Image: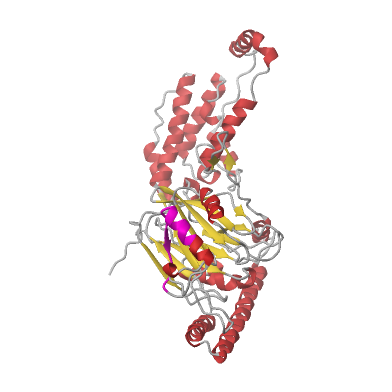
Amino acid sequence: MSTNNNQTHPLSILLWNANGLTHNKNELQHLLYDKKINIALITETHLTPTKHFNIPGYTTHRTDHPDGTAHAGTAILISTTLLHYALPTYQKTYIQATNIQIVLNHIPITISSVYCPPSQKITQPRLQTFLRTLKNSFIIGGDFNAKHTVFGCRSTNPRGQTFYNTILNNHLSFISPSAPTYWPSHTNRHPDILDFFITSLPNHLNNNIKNLEELSSDHSPVLLLLGGKPENVNNTPHSRQINFNLFQKKLDEYISLNIRLKTRDDIDSASQFLITTIQEAITGSTFSQPNTNIPTKPHQYTYLPQHLKELIKKKRQARKIWQQTHYPGHKHELNKLTNKLKKDLQTFKANQFHSFLSSLTPVNGSLWKSIKNKTKRKDVVPPLTNPNNTLAITDSEKAHLFGNHLSEIFQPHSDTNHNIATHIENVQTFLNSPLPMSLPAKPITPQEIKYYITKLHNNKSPGYDLINNKILKKLTNKAILLLTHIYNTMLRLSYIPPIWKF
């Protein structure tokens, strides 16, 4: 039976109260890779401003408790393959919310990870204020410490009634699992559902929610599978896989040397023709990975030894038995397996890291690249506020806002306005004046162009045309010859085409 590699997989959203994220990192990392999680909503992270948290292959957004101490807090881990934008966080003592925006079925959707501490009072006005900070379409996942029988809980508490009334008044819906998510250690407390989703998405969007017997916390994780196609990060031509043999073949097919080069307009046409031809050859010889929203695993974490897999399986079984019986002996066995798993995972990662360090050498540049990757931190650019108090979220919206701002700031001084016509006339006279007499420039040869292209560094960013130095080094002799003719005509006419001024 054949499978279609281009099929769209459901969006997977993990919801979990970690009760301290740092000491559960190894288990969480394995679960994210094993279950191919797209987005993880984490509550009770217990992070502080001095603590950093990162899992390879995921971008971390977080909201710590306002007092800066190690309790409460939320985070969102989203696969680096998914296109998303950071939104303003909501940081109150009674609600901590981390917010991002994705595009699902071409519709902007706000994803929010929320934690509501049980000791703080939450009223309907406070909930309404928080909901107004979200967009029209949103998914809120969190530990609300709110119980209501409608959610599947054993009983109803005042906060649960407040949440239920808010859901009804705002015409929202909820998605809750069928089994408890909170498993208290105290014998006088009962397991219950505290972790669920609140959403304003349309009902026709298919969803499936289930409990997972994974991870080490007093809360078990919940997995929501949501039908729909999220937008992925766009790949540019220089970041995809290019078949350079095919590229050179197509380039020679497309290029024509029978091009008129007499005037400045001819230079503009020829330079545009060369750029377009190279871009078309790149497109025709570029192969990208199947368009799927499943996150890929970093190569150093693609497997676990068999004994660790067996230990995870035993721990999962022990947790299930304890949740059914609540016998102290079963709890002791679960704690024993949990501690052993944490220790063995830590040892495994330490050995992997030691092997990785041993493989580094300054000869091939691997040592420098590793240090650069470890020390380089990419800061998330927060949304900007437009003059009308709306938010500029996407990159294009931010660029447009900056462009408008700079165009308003950089204006001609008022004292030069009365001489502007004379100034422009002087500039035009200077530009149109004949050049001083001198010997003609020595013509450029194809060998010179090849030589200087080989000296270019591969890791430099491309220009406006997205043709990087690695592609330039693969140009054929025919393309180099056309480029030589264009350069010599530019020298003869003292003219540079605008497309090469960017």
Instruction: Give above or below for 198 relative to 149.
Output: above
Give coordinates of residue 192: x percent, y percent.
49, 75
The colour scheme used to paint the residues is secondary structure
Q: Residue furthest bottom?
A: 329
Asked if the magenta segment contains residue 174, the reply would be: yes
Give coordinates of residue 73: x percent, y percent.
62, 62
Using the rendered view, name the quadrant where residue 173 is placed.
bottom left
| Residue 133 visible in the current orientation | yes
Instruction: Give above or below for 163 relative to 315.
Output: above
For this view, does 361 lie left or right of residue 8? right
Q: How many marks?
A: 0
Give coordinates of residue 354: x percent, y percent.
66, 72
The residue lying toward the viewer, choosing from 425 and 204, is 204
Magenta segment: 163-178
The residue lying toward the viewer, choosing from 100 and 425, is 100
Instruction: Give above or below for 459 relative to 191.
Output: above
For this view, does 453 lie left or right of residue 152? right
| Residue 297 visible in the current orientation | no
